[in-house]
Image (cartoon, rainbow, N blue to C red):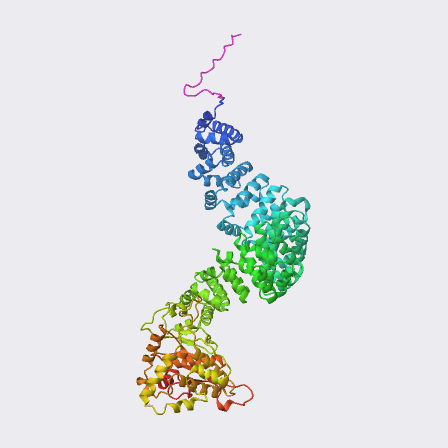
């Protein structure tokens, strides 16, 4: 046999590297391996990095610092499935690190990650790719990138994945994305509601919770609510509420239901299926504060719709809300109060809360929780608006003190609401007096100073409703409440300006307050407001006129007109016309000025300190006056005594007598420090005479005619038109100013008067005896009185009458004559 020869082994090729097993304990070494062209090395390196990253945040930061992220992003699109899978798993973990997220956004890897969601990929790739996107979507820029790269559609598809982690990650990412309105719109187009609803049946609470939270966001849009309703989503939600084991989901389920109840169709559907009654019962009987709070919020949202309110009222929602007011949790009580506020638009609900609800809300006003006080005050404001019974109920529940205390709250809403309730209460006089007795005028000062326009508006309205008598206005004035009120007239807010004007109009109801308002500049501000077409309102005009009506001297100077309802009282003075924006000096200041060449200021003052005035005897009156009157029995005798004198001499003696008869001003040369206006004994006598002789006349026309003759007689008699230029009234007025050492002339001293002297005297005397007449200032020293009289043919007619006709009283040319006004300008031109 031949010898067996051993076959020689061929040596390995020289260009082939012998296999090398490397065991590395350094992350840096493994990161370097990510650049290897070998799939096996890449796969093992990725696996090692994945395990390293799982161990904590520090390791993720280390990998970032070692530069692992950039080579890993390239492996997301590697041809080898294992390499691609392992790289995706790493990013699922790494993307929770904020610095990694930032770098991933810069590297723009979103397309590569979203590509891993393709249906043909493994479940594990789906899991970690969706986890990466969930982490990336936590920030706004990440959301934008995911949406712009079309990530929403594959994520919705993965909601139907058999793997719970894939569902959870996808749902979390979708929840983050739908915070943006544009994503919500796209979600509706992709019909995402059905797969989300399916997740409510999941056995994993976290998936159910994320699904509910997502539904809570997307049902803010009407289209999504409709889709939810069409896919029987409400049934799923009610079932969750009925399942005690799912009580950790009840709060979110209620939030979704709250959104859905905004739609009439939804609330009808839930009511028809008995779900609404279950919801109310669930809310009332739950022991979890957040559940009760969300139930109340659901009711609030639903109650914004009128038809919804009607259905809720039929389901006796009020009982549930009153029960929730008794909760120990402030949040629940706040939500219940807000729901009551919303339900107040229904009159039936308002009536229900009269006995049940209002007392509890009053108690809540005493809470230390400012937000709760605000919510309770809002409910009371809505309950008492246009409802006197509820306003009374609030007062009967001892609500006035707590409401006034809320006016000093730190929350503007609470102050505004409390002010509204007090305003509603003050509509009833007994309640208004009660509110005044509790110091409202002092308490409202702080709200008037508020910088919040809602508070300013409501506070001004409270002043308008409570300052209805002299005592209240005096308290407001003494408390410094008029200054901020005048300041509010300057507001740029229309409602604030309107309510402030209303309050000023009410406060101008008495002379002292009106004068103080004028001193503070209210008239000037209102005048500027009323000159502006955009800023004026009916209340600013009414307030301006009301202030002027309490300051007739200013009104006549500014407007040149006093109506028959503007009664001239003592202290009135005619300064003459002043231009808008010009201030009228007070009477005292004018009286203390030296005489000048300015027009004489005519004063009305019947208060006399001269002895004998006001005596009922005619003789005393004549003696004190020392002057002729058309009503005096001694007139004939006096005229006879002057017959022998020449005409010019007689006039000269008469003028000297008149000047000498002028008394000195009250207080002149005396030590009496209290200033009083100049007395006017002659005018006092005029008042006495016309009261005694003209007032008893039964015919108004006769009263007017006789009074006109009386006034003309006192002012120089009848003056023919052609003789008017020779009527030396200017010299007479200059002599009076010189004699009195003042520009202020009491009307009774004027013995030569023309149009404006006579018209003023006629108006002043007519007002004393109840003859209705106006005083109108014209041009060039003209002024006249207008009266309204029934036509002779209308007297004695029974039934409705046409309005009386307007006449001008002649005091100059034919004293006592009346001219009917048809065309005012033409008639007056001819007449005057």
- The answer to whether residue 305 is visible is no
* Position of residue 378 measured from the top left corner of the image (x, y, whole percent): 57, 57
Query: Which corner quadrant of the image does residue 365 belong to?
Result: bottom right
- The total number of labels drawn is 0
Asked if residue 760 is positioned above or below residue 380 in the image, the reply reads below
Q: Nearer the viewer, residue 340 or 444?
A: 444
Q: Is residue 214 left or right of residue 111?
A: right
Asked if residue 451 is positioned above or below residue 528 in the image, the reply reads above
Q: Main secondary structure of the magenta part?
A: loop
Q: Nearer the viewer, residue 206 or 730?
A: 730
Magenta region, residue range = 1-22
* Position of residue 145 measured from the top left corner of the image (x, y, whole percent): 45, 44
State yes or no: residue 442 in magenta. Answer: no
* Position of residue 385 measured from the top left corner of the image (x, y, whole percent): 58, 63
- The answer to whether residue 508 is visible is yes
State yes or no: residue 11 in magenta. Answer: yes
Asked if residue 678 is positioned above or below residue 313 in the image, the reply reads below
Question: Which residue corresponds to the image point at 45% horizontal and 19% vertical from the top-left?
Answer: 18
Query: Which corner quadrant of the image does residue 221 belong to?
Result: bottom right
Q: Is residue 257 left or right of residue 637?
A: right
């Amino acid at each position: 046999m031949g010898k067996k020869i051993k076959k020689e082994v061929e040596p390995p090729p020289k260009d082939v590297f012998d296999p090398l097993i490397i065991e590395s304990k350094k992350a840096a070494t493994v990161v370097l391996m990510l650049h290897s062209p070998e799939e096996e090395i890449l796969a093992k390196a990725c696996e090692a990095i994945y395990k390293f990253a799982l161990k904590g945040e520090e390791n993720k930061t280390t990998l970032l610092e070692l530069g692992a992220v950039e080579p890993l992003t390239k492996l997301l699109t590697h041809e080898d499935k294992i390499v691609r899978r392992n790289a995706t798993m790493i990013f699922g973990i790494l993307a929770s690190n904020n610095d990694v997220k930032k770098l991933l956004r810069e590297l723009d890897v979103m397309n590569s990650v979203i590509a891993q969601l393709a249906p043909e990929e493994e479940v594990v790739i789906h899991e970690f790719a969706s986890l990466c996107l969930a982490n990336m979507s936590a920030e706004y820029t990440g959301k934008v990138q995911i949406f712009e790269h079309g990530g929403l559609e594959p994520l919705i598809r993965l909601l139907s994945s058999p793997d719970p982690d894939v569902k959870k990650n996808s749902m979390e990412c979708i929840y983050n994305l739908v915070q943006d309105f544009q994503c919500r719109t796209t979600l509706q187009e992709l019909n995402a509601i059905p797969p989300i609803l399916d997740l409510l049946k999941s056995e994993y609470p976290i998936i159910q919770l994320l699904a509910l939270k997502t539904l809570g966001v997307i049902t803010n849009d009407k289209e999504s609510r409709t889709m939810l309703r069409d896919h029987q989503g409400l049934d799923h939600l009610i079932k969750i509420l009925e399942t005690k084991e799912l009580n950790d989901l009840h709060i979110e389920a209620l939030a979704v239901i709250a959104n859905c109840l905004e739609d009439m169709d939804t609330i009808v559907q839930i009511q028809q299926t008995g779900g609404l009654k279950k919801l109310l019962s669930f809310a009332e009987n739950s022991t979890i504060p957040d559940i009760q709070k969300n139930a109340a919020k659901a009711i609030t949202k639903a109650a914004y719709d009128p038809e919804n309110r009607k259905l809720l009222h039929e389901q006796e929602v009020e009982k549930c809300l009153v029960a929730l007011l008794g909760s120990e949790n402030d949040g629940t009580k706040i939500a219940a109060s807000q729901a009551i506020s919303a339900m107040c638009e229904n009159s039936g609900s308002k009536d229900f809360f009269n006995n049940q609800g209002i007392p509890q809300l009053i108690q809540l006003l005493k809470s230390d929780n400012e937000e709760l006080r605000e919510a309770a005050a809002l409910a009371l404001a809505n309950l008492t608006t246009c409802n006197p019974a509820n306003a009374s109920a609030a007062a009967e529940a001892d609500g006035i003190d707590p409401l006034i205390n809320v006016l000093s709250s730190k929350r503007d809403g609470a102050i505004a609401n409390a002010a509204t309730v007090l305003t509603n209460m003050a509509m009833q006089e007994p309640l208004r007096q009660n509110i005044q007795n509790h110091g409202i005028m002092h308490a409202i000062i702080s709200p008037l100073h508020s910088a919040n326009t809602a508070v300013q508006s409501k506070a001004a309205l409270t002043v308008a409703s409570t300052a209805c008598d002299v005592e209240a206005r005096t308290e407001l004035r003494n408390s410094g409440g008029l200054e901020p009120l005048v300041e509010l007239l300057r507001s740029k807010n229309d409602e604030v300006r309107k309510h402030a004007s209303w309050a000023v109009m009410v406060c101008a109801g008495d002379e002292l307050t009106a004068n103080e308002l004028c001193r503070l500049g209210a008239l000037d501000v209102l005048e500027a407001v009323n000159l502006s077409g955009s800023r004026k309102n009916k209340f600013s005009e009414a307030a301006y006129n009301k202030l002027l009506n309490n300051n007739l001297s200013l009104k006549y100077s500014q407007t040149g007109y006093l109506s028959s309802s503007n009664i001239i009282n003592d202290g009135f003075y005619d300064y003459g016309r002043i231009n808008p924006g010009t201030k009228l000096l007070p009477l005292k200041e004018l009286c203390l000025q030296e005489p000048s060449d300015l027009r004489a200021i005519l004063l009305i003052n019947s208060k006399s300190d001269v002895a004998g005035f006001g005596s009922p005897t005619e003789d005393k009156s004549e003696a004190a006056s020392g002057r002729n009157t058309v009503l005096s029995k001694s007139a004939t005798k006096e005229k006879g005594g002057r017959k022998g004198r020449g005409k010019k001499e007689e006039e000269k003696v008469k003028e000297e007598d008149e000047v000498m008869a002028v008394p000195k001003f009250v207080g002149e040369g005396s030590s009496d420090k209290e200033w009083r206006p100049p007395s006017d004994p002659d005018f006092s006598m005029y008042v006495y005479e016309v009261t005694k002789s003209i007032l008893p006349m039964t015919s108004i026309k006769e009263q007017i005619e006789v009074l006109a003759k009386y006034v003309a007689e006192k002012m120089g008699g009848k003056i023919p038109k052609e003789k008017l230029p020779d009527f030396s009234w200017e010299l007479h007025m200059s002599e009076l100013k010189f004699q009195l050492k003042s520009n202020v002339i009491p009307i009774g001293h004027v013995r030569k008067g023309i149009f404006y002297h006579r018209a003023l005297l006629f108006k002043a005397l007519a007002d004393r005896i109840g003859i209705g007449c106006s005083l109108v200032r014209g041009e060039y020293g003209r002024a006249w009185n207008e009266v309204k009289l029934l036509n002779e043919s209308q007297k004695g007619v029974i039934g409705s009458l046409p309005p009386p006709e307007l006449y001008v009283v002649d005091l100059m040319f034919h004293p006592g004559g009346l001219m009917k006004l048809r065309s005012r300008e033409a008639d007056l031109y001819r007449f005057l």
